[in-house]
Amino acid sequence: MSLTDLHDQITGKIIEQLEQGLAPWRQPWKTGITFGMPLNGVTRKPYRGINVPLCWYDMQEKGFQSNEFASFKQWAEKKEYVRKGEKATQIVYYDTIERKKDDEITKIPFLKMSYVFNKCQLKSYNPEQETKEEVDIVKSIQQVDAFVKNTDAIIKHGGNQAFYNKAQDYIQMPPTVAFIGTKTQSPTEAYYSTELHELSHWTGAEKRCNRQYGKRFGDHDYAFEELVAELSSAFLCAELGIADGPQLDHASYIGHWLAILKEDKKAILTAASAASKAGDCLKAFQTNALSHDRPLIGNSPGIVLS
């Protein structure tokens, strides 16, 4: 498969769901099960970038009850075997080729397709033995409070809008009473998923990840930055165990995202990569906090809400 075909195929999946008003990078709550971040069932490493929504897409479409994926060979090394007739989930990874010019060897990265199978596709899989952990809402609040606190981001509360002020480098959040929740979210979860969305914008500042924000609603950079924050928020919510419902203004961006993806087949891969880097930036603050004897999760006084 050529690189162009690969970009077309990935972008086509995303466009298909956006045209239905759905964001495929959000957790598939349709089955009522909290999946969390997709991870490799053998190495235990979480998938990153565009591979997260690609795995989530198949988890939703095929009704998988597990977030674990691995290649046919990896499962076999654990004496686990894929059932006959099962279709793989397509993910991507970067490889390199060497080119020699003027006695210098240059390594050029390129994208390749790989195939993985979900744990539910194994011969040994028994859904009755699959344990489901209930999300402890109170614990999740403590985790996110500590996560946010360790970034040292300035977060103000009041008014009726949630936004990141780039010029003054602070996040504005409405008071908690303004969050009404959804069918899949409590008001508290709605608050935290919105906070993580704005915190993802915060990482784009020049002194952090240095992303372009755009100047007004509807321009390319503005819409692209919203796409990055949407993906980053979805990834973080999955890792922290929060139900990640759509933002209130989510629908207004879909048309702009569709235009970006149809214009540039590489855009969704670029956005997903930037979202993972935003998450890495926030996690780096957690490591720094630990080195200064500050809490990473639990036992945190939390942020002050007004």
Image (cartoon, helix red, strand yellow):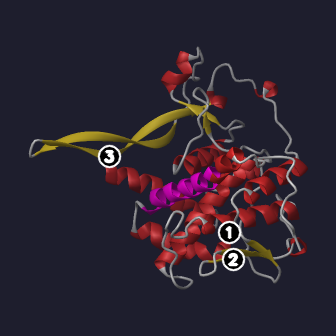
Let me know if residue 5 is in the magenta part: no
User: Whole-percent x and y of residue 85?
Assistant: 54, 28
Question: Closest to the observer: 239 or 2?
Answer: 239
Q: CA distance from mark 1 to mark 3?
A: 32 Å
For the residues labelled 1 and 2, say whether their Cβ atoms are less than 8 Å apart.
yes
User: Whole-percent x and y of residue 210?
Assistant: 49, 67
The residue wearing badge 3 is 109
Residue at x 32%, y 46% (from the top left corner) = 109
User: Whole-percent x and y of residue 36?
Assistant: 71, 44
What's drawn in magenta, residue-wise? 267-284
Dominant secondary structure of the magenta stretch? helix
Q: CA distance from mark 1 to mark 2?
A: 6 Å
N-terminal of the two: label 2 or label 3?
3
Give the residue type that dot 1 points to: Glu
The kind of secondary structure element at disc 3 is strand
- Residue neighbourhood size for the residue with mark 2, other residues' Cα within 10 Å, grouped as few (<14), some (14–19), many (≥20): some
Residue 28 seen: no
- Residue neighbourhood size for the residue with mark 3, other residues' Cα within 10 Å, grouped as few (<14), some (14–19), many (≥20): few
Residue at x 87%, y 48% (from the top left corner) = 299
Give the residue type that dot 2 points to: Phe
Residue at x 15%, y 43% (from the top left corner) = 104
Identify the disc placed on residue 198: 1
Residue at x 72%, y 43% (from the top left corner) = 35
Residue at the far left: name it.
102
The kind of secondary structure element at disc 1 is helix
N-terminal of the two: label 1 or label 3?
3
User: Whole-percent x and y of residue 26?
Assistant: 66, 56
Identify the disc placed on residue 163: 2
For the residues labelled 2 and 3, say whether their Cβ atoms are less than 8 Å apart.
no
